[in-house]
Image (tube, rainbow, N blue to C red):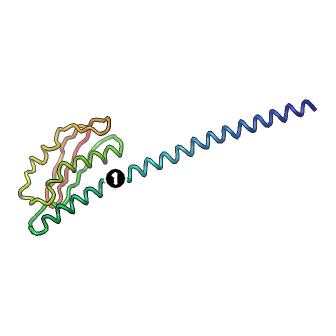
C-alpha cells in the first residue's frame, strides 16, 4: 500500500510539472505571436499617419494655388534606396525628408531651383532614434510631382 502511495505522489508531481511547463511554453508562444502582430500594426499605423499628414499638406497647398491655373507642383515622392534598416526608421526618414520640401507644394514648377532642392538633403546626416543615416541624392525628377531618389547609408 505504501508503494502505491509513492507512485501516486510521483504521478501527480510529474503531471503538475508537465502542466506548469505547458502553461509557460504556451504563454511564451502566445506573447511572441501577439508582439509580432502589434509590431506590424504599429508599422502600418505609422505609415498611414505619415500618408495622412502628407495628403493634408498637399491638399492645403493645392487649395491655395487653385486660382493660379499654372503648372504647379502637386506632390512629393521620396524613394529611399537602402540595403538595410528598420521599416519604421524608413517611414520616419521619408516623413522628415518630405517635411523639408513641403513649402514647395503649390509653387510654380518654373520657379523651383532644382539644384537648391538637391542641396537641402544631399550629404546630410539624419538621426532617427539612436541611429544616424547619411543621405545622398541620386536622382531628381521635377514635373507636377517631385520625385527624389535618396541613397541611405
> Residue, x 68% and y 38% (percent of image)?
20
> Residue, x 70% and y 40% (percent of image)?
19
- Which element type, helix, strand or loop, lies under badge 1? helix
* Residue 83 image-quadrant placement: top left
> Residue, x 52% and y 43% (percent of image)?
32
The C terminus lies in quadrant: top left
Residue closer to the observer: 23 or 71: 23
Q: Relative to residue 70, is residue 94 depicted above or below?
A: above
- For the image shown, how many numbered marks are present on the structure? 1
> Residue, x 43% and y 50% (percent of image)?
40
Q: Relative to residue 24, is residue 104 depicted above or below?
A: below
The N terminus lies in quadrant: top right
Classify residue 78 as left or right of residue 22.
left
Disc 1: which residue: 47
Q: Relative to residue 6, is residue 83 depicted above or below?
A: below
In percent of width and height, residue 55 lies at 25, 60
Amino acid at each position: 500500500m505504501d508503494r502505491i502511495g509513492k507512485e501516486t505522489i510521483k504521478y501527480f508531481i510529474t503531471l503538475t510539472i508537465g502542466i506548469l511547463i505547458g502553461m509557460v511554453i504556451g504563454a511564451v508562444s502566445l506573447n511572441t505571436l501577439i508582439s509580432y502582430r502589434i509590431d506590424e500594426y504599429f508599422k502600418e499605423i505609422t505609415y498611414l499617419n505619415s500618408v495622412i499628414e502628407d495628403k493634408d499638406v498637399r491638399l492645403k497647398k493645392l487649395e491655395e494655388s487653385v486660382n493660379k491655373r499654372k503648372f504647379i507642383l502637386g506632390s512629393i515622392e521620396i524613394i529611399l534606396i537602402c540595403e538595410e534598416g528598420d521599416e519604421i526608421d524608413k517611414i520616419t526618414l521619408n516623413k522628415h525628408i518630405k517635411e523639408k520640401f513641403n513649402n514647395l507644394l503649390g509653387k510654380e514648377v518654373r520657379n523651383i531651383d532644382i539644384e537648391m532642392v538637391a542641396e537641402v538633403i544631399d550629404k546630410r546626416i539624419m538621426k532617427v532614434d539612436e541611429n544616424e543615416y547619411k543621405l545622398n541624392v541620386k536622382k531628381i525628377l521635377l514635373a507636377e510631382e517631385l520625385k527624389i531618389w535618396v541613397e541611405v547609408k
